[in-house]
Amino acid sequence: MKFTRLTPLFTAATLSAEISPPNRACESFRIPVTVSSEDLIYALPHFNSDFDVADFIDILSSRSSLPISSIFGGTHNVTAAYTIGATFCRPQHNYTNNTVLIATHGLNFDRSYWDPNLQNGNYSFVDFAVSQGYSVLFYDRLGVGESSRVSGYAAQLSNQVAILQRLVGTVRDTKYKDRFGRPKSVVLVGHSFGSGISLATVALDPTIADGLVLTGFSLNTSYSNPIGFAMAAQPRIAALQNPQKWSQLDTGYLTPADLYANVNTFFKKPEYDTSVAEYSDVTKEPFAITELLSAATLDSRPLAFTGPTMIIAGEYDFIFCTSDCNGALDYPASLVFPQAKAFKAVSYPNAGHGLNLHLNARGAFKEITMFLSSHGL
């Protein structure tokens, strides 16, 4: 893909002619950002082989599991410049809704999670949102896809949050109105770890966004299953599993062992097409071990955020509900958002953790956009 210099901020190429359905216009960018964050220092020996990873997961899942304090050796302030791969899609016609959705994907994916190359857009959150008049900025997390590569022992919640903060500022900056328009409202939309990033972002600055949608996510630690995810995924060192694709990554980047480990954690039979599961496995992206571990530091104390907030997870979400989200999402989430203008929790039927990749994904997209529009977004 060829990228050309368009502005002092962006390196970009217009993709509308390549991938955009008739009702949307899209551009892809590489966006330079400089951010500061207080990052955890990984204190354990780095992995040398998949035997090391298997042993670490075994220790992590034991009853006498390592406390976070023994995995990380304090924190340090890091200021760094990165380049973030992103795509912005807006309605081609009838561009009247001034709400921009900023979508952050979770572990095991890149930004194509929001807009996969599958079956006429049936699995595309971007297509559906644009059809409802929204614009969507979706981007690759640090260390993933077209974004800057950093050590798999360094990418973590704190620097991902700092990047999202900067992206929100860029979208709101009137200097770039020719690209993003003049957004009246910004809504943060996340999936899984991306929901954690979005939640942590509004926790740090409750005024940064006007709405919040957390998909594939729950705040109920009684039913969440992160260790189960680590065990079921049977992670392997990405560079060893596929050296042709990931040889440039250090051993801190992991990926599920195979298609069936991927299915075990993200899908629920019979609510998916096996070809979609195969596509998901072929296009999967490694995650940093420090991303997985730093998720445990997410602060879920009551927030001052006032915007409409939705939590929606597949009924059979394995990672956040141990495969049964019914009755598991409202509490304690409703207490975390006591000042929200509106709060809604949805256990979405017939879907697993990879909500967007199930047969009824468009119904979930409709739940999200109807909630937002009913509250002025």
Image (tube, rainbow, N blue to C red):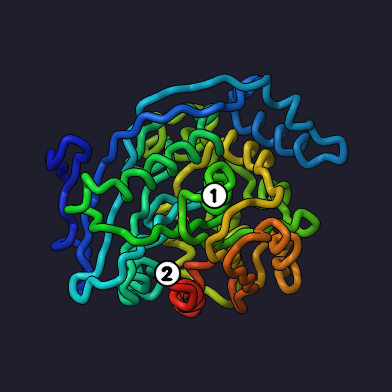
| Residue at the image position 51 percent from the left and 72 percent from the top | 358
Q: Is residue 261 visible?
A: yes
The residue under label 2 is 377
Q: Is residue 356 left or right of residue 124?
A: right
Q: Is residue 207 left or right of residue 196?
A: left
In this rendering, the answer to whether 98 lies above or below 103 is: below
Q: Nearer the viewer, residue 165 or 131?
A: 165
Q: Position of residue 302 (x, y in %)?
A: 69, 52
Q: Position of residue 79 (x, y in %)?
A: 44, 23
Would you call the spot at circle 2 few (<14 residues within 10 Å), some (14-19), or many (20 or more)?
A: many
Q: Position of residue 5 (x, y in %)?
A: 13, 38
**At label 1, which amino acid type do we have?**
Pro
- Identify the image quadrant of residue 247: top left
Would you call the spot at circle 1 few (<14 residues within 10 Å), some (14-19), or many (20 or more)?
A: some
Q: Nearer the viewer, residue 26 or 315?
A: 26
Look at the numbered discs 2 and 1 and tell me whether their residues touch, using CB distance below 8 Å: no
Helix, strand or loop status at disc 2: loop
